[in-house]
């Protein structure tokens, strides 16, 4: 297994490398640069050239990329061109934990609701409960974040005034650089964004769990377990559940990477200082290094997520073996 | 001459008319009431999009600074002046009162007609993006699956690599590129595309971006299907009687292969609708004044406390359309799944 993990990690290096290379090249291909305007007016040509020279933007692309890699080897993700007082490392340190915390909470909520709901729907297959659960699940999948976010803000934030309508409840510095201080204010602020993100997720998880469990329950070994006289609960929890979670694990990898690096819609709606928003804004602001570094982080998370999913496959279904 | 007796052949020689799998699936689909409801709603929306000019009393583009942010169904008195100068001052309603069915947005445009024309945007995105990704995916997957060997290997390697590319990054990059290009203007082919895009209200580039980035799943599916059908006897028979490759592909493989792909594509349609709305939400979608529900939510979001209808109307429309497509896609998938037959 360890050899497999090492091999996967080594194989993923070229993929991530190609990803950041492609991003670096593509964003430089966009017309315009980071120093085109000063406020509302265009920056004078000679000043623009000086600024670009300062960040090495006048060099040929391959040389720029090579310099980027050299800096990367030192752990420096690059400078912020429009915010000279901060570096990309600073921005990542501020924004990644927020996206991470939100993402983890949303995933936990999604699974906490989705898996039991899917199990119940599968067990009470074809009854009213199943239809209701399926309907609610499709509804949860269909209401986009765009709509659910403002709706929740309106109902719970404005009318009922139960929860605050914007901002994240924890500011840097974070514990271990990543975790928030679990104060009441944190949880208070965290509810609405988490529910917005987590509802769609729990709907997807519920549908997959239900489908997977339905399929597994028809298998022979379940019949054997029942024939052995085991209690129904043992049959399901010990024998059926692990295998039925395989479709869920499949979507988990890319999903985790996406959610952990920020969903810009939710961050925009709740005015959270997260990675997703920075990501989108960096394109229009032409922050080359920020975008490349964020893509790098996203790529790494994707690789780790997929790897984790494959390891989970092996745990869920012992018939799957890697060597 | 003996009269010819009509001899009835025994009934077993002529079995009852058989049912094709397609008819089976359609029957299953019809039994699924939710799916039928979803399809009906989609059809209703299509009709609305087509007859949009008939059901919208006001043009979706006309701004009017006298009517900004009006509430739904609230009448505004119109005077005989050319520029309506209306105040709700408790005076009795006169003839020709302006009533916005769903209120108006911050620029005084009718929300109802913007929502109705927004159906055109969402539906076109759904259809075009789905078709583009389906066509590219089928072509790529069929070539890869049918060719086999090194070609197949190479093509799949490329696909595996492209699979890792974050779709959202690429879409955002493409959209920013297109918009910057449109601002600058260009000659030749690009210029033609830019003019075409402008004529379509900014939708062409969006179609290209969305369709060109989601074909990978289709390609994989198509290849899998082609691989599994390639070995079957009827293909071998066709080849034995000298059918050309093209004929085998078009006449024998594609009709069998296309079924699961259509279903997969219709399941992806809600994703396209949502992506278009999300892109418009951050300003990277269609160009104003083309109405897009995502852009409308973005505009209305700031004033959600005082004017919730600015967000709720397009939001409800978006949700209902996505819901309908989801039900339809689920119904299609369940109807064609042989394991769920005869539940």
Image: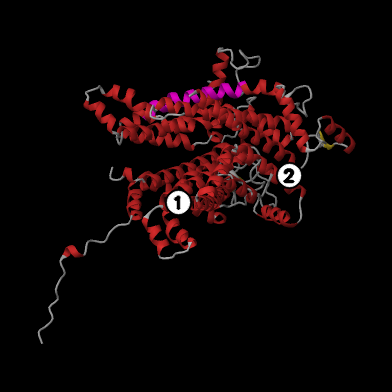
Chain on which label 2 sits: B
B132 in relation to B239, above or below: above
Q: Residues within 10 Å of mark 2 (few under 14, many from 20)?
A: some
Label 2: state its secondary structure.
helix
A172 in relation to B260, above or below: above
In the foreground, A248 or A82? A248
Q: Tell me where residue A14 appears, x and y as whole percent.
A: 62, 34
Kindly give the residue lying farthest to the bottom in the view shown. B1
Rounded to the nearest angstrom, the CA distance separating label 2 from label 1 is 41 Å
Left or right: where A131 falls relative to A254: left
Q: Which residue is mark 2?
A: B180
Kindly give the residue lying farthest to the left in the view shown. B2
In the foreground, B190 or A263? B190
Label 1: state its secondary structure.
helix
Q: Is residue A156 shown to the viewer in this render? A: no
Q: Tell me where residue A204 appears, x and y as whole percent.
A: 45, 33
Span highlighted in magenta in the image: A97-118
Q: What residue do we see at 76% from left, 30% from top? A: A67
Q: Is residue A214 magenta?
A: no
Left or right: where A308 falls relative to A84: left
Q: Is residue A72 shown to the viewer in this render? A: yes
Q: Residues within 10 Å of mark 1 (few under 14, many from 20)?
A: many
Q: Which mark is residue A272?
A: none
Q: Tell me where residue A136 appears, x and y as whole percent.
A: 41, 34
Q: Which residue is mark 1?
A: B226
Q: What residue do we see at 73% from left, 55% from top? A: B191
Q: Is residue A100 magenta?
A: yes
Q: Quadrant of residue A226?
A: top left
Q: Quadrant of residue A234?
A: top left
Chain on which label 1 sits: B
Q: Tell me where residue A309 appears, x and y as whole percent.
A: 48, 28
């Amino acid at each position: 297994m360890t050899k497999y993990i090492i091999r996967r990690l080594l194989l993923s290096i070229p993929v991530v490398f190609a990803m950041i290379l492609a991003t670096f090249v593509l964003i430089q291909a966009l017309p315009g640069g980071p120093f085109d305007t000063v406020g509302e007016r265009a920056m004078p040509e000679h000043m623009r050239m000086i600024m670009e020279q300062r960040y090495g933007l006048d060099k040929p692309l391959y040389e720029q990329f090579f310099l980027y890699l050299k800096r990367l080897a030192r752990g420096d993700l690059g400078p912020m061109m429009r915010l000279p007082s901060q570096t990309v490392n600073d921005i990542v340190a501020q924004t990644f934990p927020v996206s991470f915390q939100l993402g983890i909470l949303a995933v936990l909520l999604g699974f906490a609701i989705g898996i039991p709901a899917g199990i119940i729907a599968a067990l009470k297959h074809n009854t009213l409960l199943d239809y209701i659960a399926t309907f609610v699940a499709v509804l949860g999948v269909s209401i986009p974040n765009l709509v659910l976010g403002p709706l929740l803000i309106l109902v719970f934030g404005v009318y009922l005034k139960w929860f605050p309508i914007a901002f994240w409840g924890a500011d840097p510095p974070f514990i271990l650089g990543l975790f928030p201080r679990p104060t009441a204010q944190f949880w208070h602020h965290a509810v609405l964004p988490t529910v917005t993100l987590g509802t769609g997720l729990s709907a997807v998880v519920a549908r997959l769990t239900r489908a997977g469990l339905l399929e597994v329950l028809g298998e022979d070994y379940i019949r054997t377990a029942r024939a052995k006289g085991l209690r129904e609960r043992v049959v399901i929890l010990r024998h059926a559940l692990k295998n039925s979670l395989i479709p869920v694990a499949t979507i988990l990898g890319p999903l985790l990477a996406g959610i952990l690096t920020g969903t810009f819609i939710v961050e925009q709606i709740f005015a959270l200082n997260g990675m997703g928003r920075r990501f989108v804004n960096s394109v229009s602001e032409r922050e080359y290094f920020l975008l490349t570094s964020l893509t790098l982080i996203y790529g790494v998370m994707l690789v780790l997520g997929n790897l984790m999913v494959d390891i989970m496959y092996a745990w869920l279904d012992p018939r799957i073996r890697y060597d | 001459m003996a009269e010819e007796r009509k001899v009835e052949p025994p009934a077993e020689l002529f079995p009852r008319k058989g049912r094709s799998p397609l008819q089976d699936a359609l029957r299953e689909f019809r039994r699924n009431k939710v799916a039928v409801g979803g399809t009906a709603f989609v059809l209703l929306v299509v009709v609305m999009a087509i007859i949009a000019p008939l059901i919208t009393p006001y043009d979706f583009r006309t701004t009017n600074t006298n009517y900004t942010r009006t509430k739904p169904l609230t009448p505004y008195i119109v005077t005989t002046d050319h520029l309506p100068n209306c105040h709700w001052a408790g005076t009795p309603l006169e003839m020709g009162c302006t009533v916005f069915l769903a209120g108006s947005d911050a620029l005084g445009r009718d929300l109802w007609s913007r929502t109705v024309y927004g159906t055109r945007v969402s539906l076109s995105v759904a259809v075009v993006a789905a078709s583009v990704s389906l066509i590219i995916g089928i072509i790529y997957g069929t070539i890869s699956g049918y060719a086999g060997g090194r070609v197949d290997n190479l093509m799949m390697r490329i696909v595996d690599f492209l699979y890792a590319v974050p779709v959202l990054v690429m879409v955002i990059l493409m959209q920013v590129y297109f918009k910057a290009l449109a601002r600058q203007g260009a000659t030749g082919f690009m210029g033609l595309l830019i003019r075409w895009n402008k004529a379509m209200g900014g939708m062409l580039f969006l179609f290209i971006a969305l369709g060109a980035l989601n074909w990978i799943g289709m390609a994989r599916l198509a290849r899998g299907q082609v691989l599994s059908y390639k070995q079957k006897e009827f293909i071998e028979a066709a080849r034995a009687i000298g059918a050309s490759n093209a004929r085998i592909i078009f006449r024998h493989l594609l009709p069998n292969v296309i079924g699961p792909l259509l279903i997969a594509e219709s399941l992806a349609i809600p994703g396209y609708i949502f992506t278009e709305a999300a892109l418009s939400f951050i300003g990277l979608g269609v160009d104003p004044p083309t109405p897009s529900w995502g852009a409308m939510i973005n505009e209305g979001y700031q004033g959600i406390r005082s004017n919730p209808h600015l967000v709720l109307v397009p939001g409800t429309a978006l949700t209902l359309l996505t819901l309908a497509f989801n039900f339809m896609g689920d119904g299609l998938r369940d109807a064609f799944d042989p394991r769920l037959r005869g539940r």
